[in-house]
Amino acid sequence: MRKVINFQPQPMSRVLLGALPLLALALFYLIASDARLAANSADKLLPGLDAMRAAVDRMAFTPSPRTGEYLLWTDTAASLLRLLTGALLSAVTALLLGLFCGALPSVRAVLSPLVTLVALVPPLAILPILFICFGLGELSKVMLIIIGITPFLIRDLQMQVMAIPHEQLVKAQTLGGHSGQILVRVILPQLLPRLLDALRLSLGAAWLFLIAAEAIAATEGLGYRIFLMRRYMAMDVILPYVAWITLLAFLLDWLLRMLSRRCFPWYYAK
């Protein structure tokens, strides 16, 4: 049994093992799709590969007759702009508040209860309030992402600061460091890689809030298109869009991981 718990797959083996569930899922879908289409060639629930390939060509490589735009790329650009704007503003806000709440007890006493309270509010429950306050434009969608993930980031960074060994702070003060130097030169460098990790973990929630906002009030975007196609049961469009969102989320996660490893190699050498 010790061999099992200590077994470490090689990099190539790890890739193959990770691909097995995906291949099994794809095989299951193909079998189920063939069975449904054999029983009813007009079935829309599980479209075949040819139907989805035609839908991708129509959405991504054929101009829209009405607008002349390539809809998949237009939707992708709109959604990514909203997502990245919300994530960037959330990261900056969380870094500042997490740093000060974690390092300064007086700030923590004032702001920590408020952050905890906001974190307990379901973001989708206040979506109508955001639409009323900020309108149906881009601001309300970005604000939903910010309100949805910022409290989580703040609390995670605050706990990370509070977990820093107190001996480091004592040594810095012994060497003559004042509060500002300790914040910038001792605590902040240890906080930045954790911020990227926390941002990676919150991307799934950010996509959820984005798609929910686009489904209710938008004229373009990946979430808007999926819910528009739902009216026509166009699963040949919906499934590729879902797969595309999954691929984008994977790429963003990978980019953040590579950025963290490149900028903070010492963090992964522990």
Image (cartoon, rainbow, N blue to C red):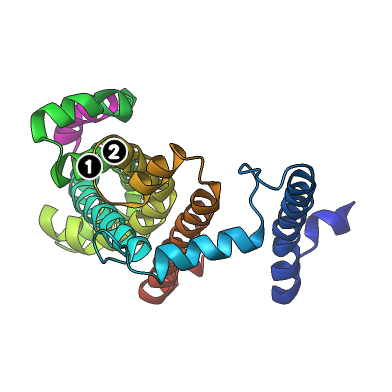
Q: In this view, does 233 lie to the left or right of 143?
A: right
Q: Position of residue 37 (x, y in %)?
A: 73, 48
Q: Are marks 2 and 1 in contact (CB under 8 Å)?
A: yes
State which tag comes first along the sequence, 2 or 1: 1
Give the residue pinned by disc 2: 213
Frontmost residue, 245 versus 93:
245
Can you tell which quarter of the image residue 210 is in? top left
Give the residue pinned by disc 1: 141
Q: In this view, does 97 lie above or below 257?
A: above
Q: Is residue 156 left or right of residue 82?
A: right
Looking at this rendering, what residue extends furthest in the right direction?
A: 1
Frontmost residue, 107 versus 219:
219
Separation (CA) of disc 2 from disc 1: 6 Å
Q: Which SS does the magenta portion mostly show?
A: helix
User: Please, what is the three-letter code of the amino acid marked with disc 1?
Assistant: Lys
Q: Position of residue 209 (x, y in %)?
A: 34, 39
- Please tell me whether mark 2 sits on a helix, a strand or a loop: helix
